[in-house]
Image (cartoon, coloured by chain):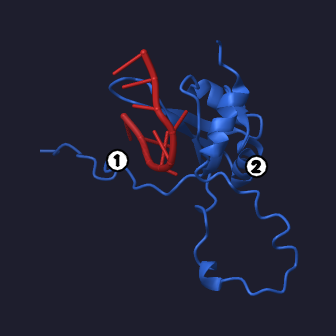
Chain colours: A blue, B red
Amino acid sequence: MAMRAAATQAAVASFAAPRGVRALYSSLTSGFPFNLPQTQTEKPPQAEPSTNLFVSGLSKRTTTEGLRDAFAKFGEVLHAKVVTDRVSGYSKGYGFVRYATLEEAAAGIKGMDGQFLDGWVIFAEYARPRPPPPSLNDAPTYNQS
DNA sequence: GGTGAGCGA
């Protein structure tokens, strides 16, 4: 019973898709004279375009190398890292990919979002802005006494 | 040994 079929995992992952429905905006907005709720004009459904990409749905066996190699086909990946636990060392199932430009990031999202990676459907989207590290800014410059 | 939504050392 070698249920290592990618189709099975893909089906499960597809059903458990949290925020992977992005292609539903097809013909719903095909020039309809309906007034859409403008309460979303200043509230984008997703994060703002950034070079940082948040990739979720990764397999446990997916490593940083595979992630970079997968996203390097749509642009120049400056940095890619798979978030792994610090105590156990196992992959948490998601990672981050940073592109050189926003165009490549968008291409990477539209090129890898909903695709297969190691037999699992991955989801790529813009990462959120993060607080800067409290170092390098307040570097203790050793009292010159 | 290894969860299955999520945002990193």
To which residue does mark 2 refer? Answer: A110
Position of the N terminus of chain A, as image quadrant, is top right
Compare residues A100 and A109 and report the one nearer the observer: A109
- Name the spot of residue A134 as percent of width and height, x first: 31, 51
Element under disc 1: loop
Name the amino acid type tagged 1.
Leu
Q: Count residues near mark 2 (Cα–Cα under 10 Å), then give few for <14, some for 14-19, many for 20+.
A: some
- Name the spot of residue A7 as percent of width and height, x first: 73, 29
- The disc at residue A56 is none
CA separation in Å, label 1 and label 2: 35 Å
To which residue does mark 1 refer? Answer: A136
Q: Is A138 displayed left or right of A71 in the figure? A: left
**Quadrant of the rendered image containing residue A144:** top left
Instruction: Establish whether labels 1 and 2 are both on one chain.
Output: yes
Name the amino acid type tagged 2.
Lys
Say which residue appears at 51% left-offset and 56% top-offset: A128
Q: Does the rendering let one see residue A122? A: no
